[in-house]
């Protein structure tokens, strides 16, 4: 039976049409093997590879190594046959290719459950959704919250991050949680009868980090903060704030955010680990004498808060609920 709560530090990818690789992979003791029936197998070998993998799953003792099979999508002529054969062979995890929307999760889950009921092992197959496209990134929250799931256990994979139904397994980076709506932990778990779904701060953080890194490294030079300024600006607008650029003498405040009686200041920098950079960023606030919250946002994970100025990691800021409300007195 597949185990949800396990380390997935290493995953060995194998083409589904290579018998020697499939046979010997577990001797290297990876946490998981990923046997690929999709991109690694040409169209004229799909049926043969499916038969090979299903027979290997039945015959080979992979010891403690988790067995994952990447199937073809249901929108291809091979997807449904892949899922039926692989689930019947007793696979631990079915991995979907290029998940773009929650409907794909629901459809595959329904088919897995149907096959499991036929063979009497209902609820034993895990389902992994891989986010590999811009559409998937845009729909990641809806995918994580896919409605109408049956009883198979779903989790999402993005890069090195694995979010499971009810648990989170990372490369020794995060602790999992069972606490409902606890935003300080890696994931929020919602249990509805036999259906386990997960809203994941961790997976969204992975996606945001990827996007920010790409924008910063490809579009702008090392000292340019424009990409993340845009991201913060759009986020503040989405929270309902009126956002303006501020001036204090000859210095600029990136954003002054106001919503009704709420007011806050934001300085943004990609990195502030360097002491001179911190001095430049923080000294702008020296001329502001009111007590409204003053933030510095950066990609640093260390806490550089000082003198009442709050430093936050930009990803944490993007994922959080709005914090303490400060009111403008009449």
Image (cartoon, grey):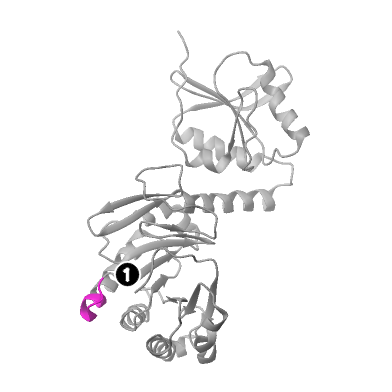
- Is residue 177 shown above or below 31? above
Segment tinted magenta in the rendering = 115-122
Q: Residue 199, percent across and down?
A: 38, 50
Question: For the point 38% across and 60% down, which residue is it?
Answer: 101
Q: Say which quadrant the C terminus sits in.
A: top left
The quarter of the picture where residue 102 lies is bottom left
86 magenta-colored: no
Residue tagged 1: 108
Question: For the point 68% across and 25% down, which residue is it?
Answer: 252
Whether residue 250 is visible, yes or no, is: yes
Q: Nearer the viewer, residue 113 or 29?
A: 29
Whether residue 146 is visible, yes or no, is: no
Count of numbered circles on the image: 1
- Is residue 225 shown above or below 261? below
Q: Residue 2, percent across and down?
A: 37, 72
Q: Judging from the image, what secondary structure is the residue with disc 1 in?
A: helix
The furthest residue to the right: 276
Q: Residue 40, percent across and down?
A: 52, 81
- Is residue 141 shown above or below 287? below
Is 14 left or right of 163, judged from the image as shown? right
Q: Nearer the viewer, residue 168 or 212?
A: 168
The quarter of the picture where residue 106 lies is bottom left
The furthest residue to the top: 330
Is 51 left or right of 7, judged from the image as shown? left
120 magenta-colored: yes
């Amino acid at each position: 039976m597949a185990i949800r709560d396990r380390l997935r530090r290493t995953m060995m990818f194998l083409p589904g049409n290579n018998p020697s690789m499939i046979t010997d992979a577990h001797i290297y003791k990876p946490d998981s093997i990923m046997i690929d029936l999709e991109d690694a197998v040409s169209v004229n070998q799909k049926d043969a590879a499916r038969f090979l993998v299903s027979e290997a799953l039945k015959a080979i003792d992979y010891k403690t190594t988790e067995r994952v099979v990447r199937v073809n999508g249901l929108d291809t002529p091979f997807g449904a046959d892949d899922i039926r054969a692989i689930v019947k062979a007793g696979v631990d995890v079915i991995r979907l290719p290029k998940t773009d929307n929650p409907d794909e999760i629901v459809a595959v889950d329904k088919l897995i459950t149907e096959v499991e009921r036929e063979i009497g092992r209902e609820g034993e197959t895990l389902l992994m959704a891989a986010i590999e496209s811009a559409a998937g990134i845009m729909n990641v929250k809806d995918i994580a919250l896919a409605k109408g799931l049956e009883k198979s256990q779903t989790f999402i994979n993005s890069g090195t991050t694995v979010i499971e139904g009810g648990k989170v397994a990372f490369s020794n980076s995060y602790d999992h949680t069972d606490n409902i709506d606890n935003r300080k932990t890696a994931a929020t778990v919602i249990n509805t009868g036999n259906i386990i779904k997960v809203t994941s701060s961790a997976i969204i953080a992975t996606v945001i980090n990827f996007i920010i890194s790409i924008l910063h490294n490809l579009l702008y030079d090392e000292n340019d903060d424009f990409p993340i300024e845009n991201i913060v600006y759009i986020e503040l607008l989405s929270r309902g704030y009126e956002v303006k650029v501020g001036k204090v003498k000859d210095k600029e405040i990136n954003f002054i955010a106001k919503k009704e009686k709420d007011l806050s200041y934001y300085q943004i920098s990609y990195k502030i680990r360097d002491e001179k950079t911190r001095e430049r960023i923080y000294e702008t606030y020296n001329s502001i004498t009111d007590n409204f919250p003053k933030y510095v946002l950066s990609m640093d994970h260390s806490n550089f808060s000082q003198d009442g100025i709050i430093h936050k990691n930009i990803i944490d800021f993007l994922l959080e609920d709005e914090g303490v409300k400060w009111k403008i007195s009449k």
